[in-house]
Amino acid sequence: MPRFRPSILALLLTLALLLFLWLPPLQLYGEALWRVLWHQPARLIEALPLQPLQRFLFLNTLALCASSAAFALLFGIPVGAACARGPHRLRNVFTVLCILPLALPPMLAASAWLEITRTPPARSMASLAAKTASPLPPVLVASLVLALCFFPIVALWLRAVLMGISPDIEDAARSLGSEWTMWQRVLVPLLWPALAGAMGLVCALAMWEMGAPDLLDARTYSVEIYRQLNAGDNLDVAGKYTKVALEGVPMLFLGLLALWPAARALRRFDRYGAATHDSWRSDTSTRRESRLIIPWAVLVLLLSPGAVLGVFLSQLRPLNILWESWASNDVEIINTMRLATLGALFITAMALLLVPAWRAWPSRLRQTALTLCVAPLLVAPILLGVALINFWNRPGLSIVYGDWPLTGITFLDQMQQWVARDGMMLIGYVARFAPLAILLLYEAVRRIDNSQIEAAQNLGANSSHIGRTIILPLLAPAALATYALLWALCGGELSTSVLINQPGGQTLPVPIFNQMHIGSTAEVAALSLTLFALCGGALLLATVLIRFLLRHITPGR
Amino acid sequence: MNNLCRIFVCLLLSVLFCSGCNRGNNAGPTQRVVLYCSVDEVYAKPIIKRLEERTGLRIDVLYDTEAAKTAGLANRIRAEKSRPRGDVFWSSALLQTLLLSREGLLQPYVSSSARYIPPPFKDSTGAWTGLGVRARVIVYHQSVKNPPRTLQDLLQPRFKGQAGISNPQFGTGSDWVAALATRQGADKTIAYFRALKKNDVRVLAGNSMVAERVARGELMVGITDSDDFYAQAKKPASGIRVQSVATNSPDNVLVPGSVAILKGAPNLKAAQQLVDALLDLDTEDELARIMPGVESTRRTPQNNTNSSFTFQLETAPADTAQWPASWDKVHEPLANILLGG
């Protein structure tokens, strides 16, 4: 890496971000630990899955994680293979369709599932008795639904790895042995770390998800913590936070267990997946295996997003329910657009400011900064919501709630109302998604070709000029992709928002989640389609712009 | 690259501009009031929009989710007690309002609009005032022969695994439990729920889910709210039926909704204005009209909209003041009985 002058600003910004990300969860757990150790050490046992309810939740969560990962693998492999090795003209179509489920918040898929699996109402005692036994346990159903939303992680990761493997290696292996030997000796060892990493990520996401398991009656840690938090018991606020913090401890360990293979896979990624082989780009032949995988991939994509959207579209009766739902939820739609735009913009800008500056740092410091910035991903979103309320809702800090007196000056008073409405939500988005943005942009920065930067340095360009004219253009596609992904994630965020949203600042997922429980299907369908159109539109627009950037703007292409 | 950057920035600015154009920003200077509302969003929204037009207030609302009904917002009020951010609490139930009142988190206000609300449905000091009443009802699927008439009937072996109730930690489920414990004692109530659990009762996330499952025939019987029964009964092919409970029976529980001003409300004047408007007879009538199964506390022959099922408001026991104490005794044992793995 070329040497730049260390920037004090970057150091301070990194420190500020680390404090911002770490202090709320540390305070939550610190206070809980202090309270328990000081007053009731026996309660430490609540952090272990030993009591019947805890054991039940632990096993349920574990089962949800494992089966979600298995289903995601089952759905993701054929789609990923179709994106990389399918008929040449269809690869882009497969890739675009594969991206769309990422814009589908799992609770929407859960709602569609409930609608599909609903049997006609029973009319007689005999049919009533026949309906009583549910054929599938809720955890299995929930994992199937979650896999339908998360399989693109497996598919896209697999696609990237497959595109990075030289076809010459495969051809050589094929010429020396059978097709089976080629898979066994060449492809599987190369693919396995990526698959394990993607499975780990799916496990973690499934464990953190609250909306879909709640709708499908699957009792997991996230669902139970949400209910505990809102239960009408006699605990004071501090006691309640202690209780949920202790109950959430196994989630930290499960998260670590799940994300470890993902981290390892990412580190190994550049050994085989740093570059896309041009031979694959120009390869227009359809591989033999595609005859098997294409029908399976088509089936998966027909299920998600196909069937999910189909269910919602079929429920739009009468059609004007769409306009009516927009009219009655105008504030929520506007809030979603505003908050997702601001949140994604702020997080991307912050990551763009920080991560390229780390290039000048010594390798060990850079790795430490990255690890510390990404580690808060381990905190489950529902606990993050609790931690944020616990941290920010106090004298001196509650300025983020717009807690300052009205001044009579219009601009300042408008600002106060804006902060009161949006402040906590933006903080929640940053706390939840900044680690992800940093991770994505770090990988992009790592792949920048140093020769251009060194050449510019030799010509006397200063670091700001290099950043503006070389690094930023090279990072533009990754930044745009990060921005779009963050937009979709912020727009569909529920687990943290449901706890921290402020009066007048409610986003669309919250009323959708609410109305799903009430059972108003047409309104839910209309709002779900709206949310999907917003998030999916952001991703598709970004895909188009990235292709444009890669073809016309990025130097070296 | 520069052109693209410009396009990108313009795109962002236009999105921000459009998203900034909401009702608050172009309506000129208006008095803001923050309403914490646990009434179903779909019913509350049109009423709130009309109140905004009528009063000129800008009402920023925070709704509760169905799964955390009322208790979620009440906990939030508790968490914010040192720096209250809400002005008015409009609850679809009463128990949490009573608990908040006991904790000194409500600001008494006797609204002139509440003059004709009967005493059982309001607090004498003005800490809370009732708005709309619903009943706890036994619902059953149409194919059930000899439907249950009392809560004890739900313990029959034929309903094993076939009866549903909402989680009693939330919403009107907790009011129901508190009322039962007040009338028949904590021990008897706990014993009843233990027997119910032994009969494999299904504890669902909300009353609407209980009604929906019974309507679809996924459960034979259930206990739910009258408004949730009506919401399902109006659907085509719904198989839900309701059982009238004898008015003198301890099973007959009426749960009033409630309106209260929060102590330390940042916008007190506007809060009082909003409470007056909410408790207005027209508002309550509108609530009863759009939310079948909810009755006006000031029911008159003109506003009695529910023809197939009537509440006996006159016979409502005035025992709500004892609900918090009864709740203290039963909630924890009940949580262990019903929700233990």
Image (tube, coloured by chain):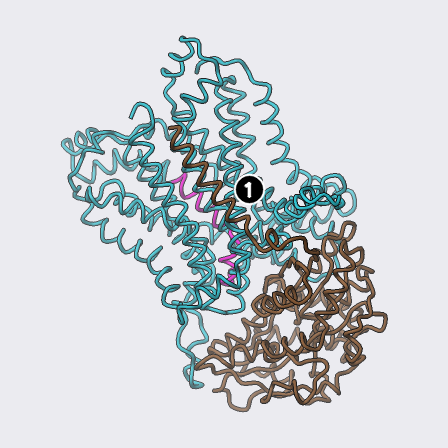
Chain colours: A cyan, B brown
Quadrant of residue B120 in the image?
bottom right
Secondary structure beneath label 1: helix
Q: Residue at x 66, y 88 (%)?
A: B302
Q: Is residue A548 above or below residue B101?
A: above
Work out whether residue A458 or residue B77 is closer to the camera in this orientation and state it: A458
Quadrant of residue A284 in the image?
top left
Task: Classify the position of the C terminus of chain A by image quarter.
Answer: top left
Q: Is residue B270 above or below residue A384?
A: below
Q: Is residue B237 magenta?
A: no
Q: How many other residues sit within 10 Å of disc 1, few (<14), some (14-19) or many (≥20)?
A: many
Overall secondary structure of the magenta stretch? Answer: helix
Q: Residue at x 17, y 29 (%)?
A: A172
In the picture as drawn, the residue positioned furthest to the left comes out as: A175
Give how far across and how far down residue A77 sits, in percent.
31, 46
Work out whether residue B340 or residue A555 is closer to the camera in this orientation and state it: A555
The three-letter code of the residue at mark 1 reads Arg
Residue position for label 1: A432
Give how far across and how far down residue B223 sits, in percent.
60, 78
Q: Chain of mark 1?
A: A
The answer to whether B198 appears left or right of A111 in the picture is right
Q: Residue at x 43, y 26 (%)?
A: A472
Give the magenta part as a residue range.
Answer: A196-218
Residue B115 in view here: yes
Q: Is residue A8 above or below residue B92?
A: above
Give how far across and how far down residue B144 sits, in percent.
50, 87
